[in-house]
Each structure stands twice: as structure tokens, then as C-alpha cells.
Amino acid sequence: MRLLIYATLAYTAVLVLALAIGLIMIAYYLNGARSSLKKIADGLKQVDTNVAPLEQVLTAANTGLENVRDNLQKVDTNLVPLAPTTVEQE
């Protein structure tokens, strides 16, 4: 009977030790992930700062491209009556 008690205590000690080591490893890797995420967040803030001046330029370019599109649509509308109605077959 005494052997069974000692075996149970030894098994419990090994189990607690394994769980403790597992939790310590999880905490270690989570800390590393937190550090990496902080670096990524800092990099994204820098990207946001770098691209902020582009908003005005891209808005102006978009307005110009909309004007070009509108003019091309007018040209297309004006050319439709000039298109041949039937295609000649050889």
C-alpha cells in the first residue's frame, strides 16, 4: 500500500512539474510575440506618417482622372452614330 502512495506522489510531482514548465514556456513565447507585435505596430505608425502627404496628391490625381474618363465617355457617345451598322462579310 505504501508503494502505491509513493508512486502516486511521484506521479503528481512529475505532472505538476511538467505543467509548470509548459506554462513557463507559454509565457516566454507570448512575451516574444508581444515584443514582435509592438515592433509591427511601431512600423505601421511610421508607414502611416510617411503616406499621410500622399492623400492630397492622390485626391488631385483622382479628380484629373475622373475628368479624363468623363471626356472619353463623351467621345464614345459622339462616335457611336458614326459606327457602321453592319459588318461586311467576305
Image: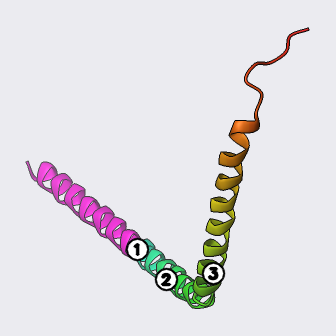
Q: Secondary structure at mark 2?
A: helix
Disc number lying in front (2 or 1): 2
Residue 19 in magenta stretch? yes
Of the image marks 3 and 2, the number of the one nearer the N terminus: 2
Mark carried by residue 41: 2
Question: How far apart are labels 3 and 2 at the CA level?
Answer: 30 Å
The residue where tag 3 is placed is: 60
Residue 58: x percent and y percent? 63, 78
Residue 50, horizontal then vertical, whole percent: 63, 89
Of callouts 2 and 1, which one flags the residue occurring earlier in the amino acid sequence?
1
Nearer to me, 84 or 35: 84
Magenta highlight: main SS: helix
Q: Quadrant of residue 14?
A: bottom left
x%, y% of residue 33?
46, 74
Residue 64 against residue 22 in the figure, above or below: below
x and y percent of residue 18 in the render?
Answer: 32, 62
Look at label 1 and name its amino acid: Leu
- Secondary structure category for the residue under label 3: helix
Front: mark 3 or 1: 3
| Foreground pick, 30 / 52 | 52
Amino acid at dot 2 = Ala
The residue shown at (29%, 63%) is 19
The residue singled out by tag 1 in the image is 30
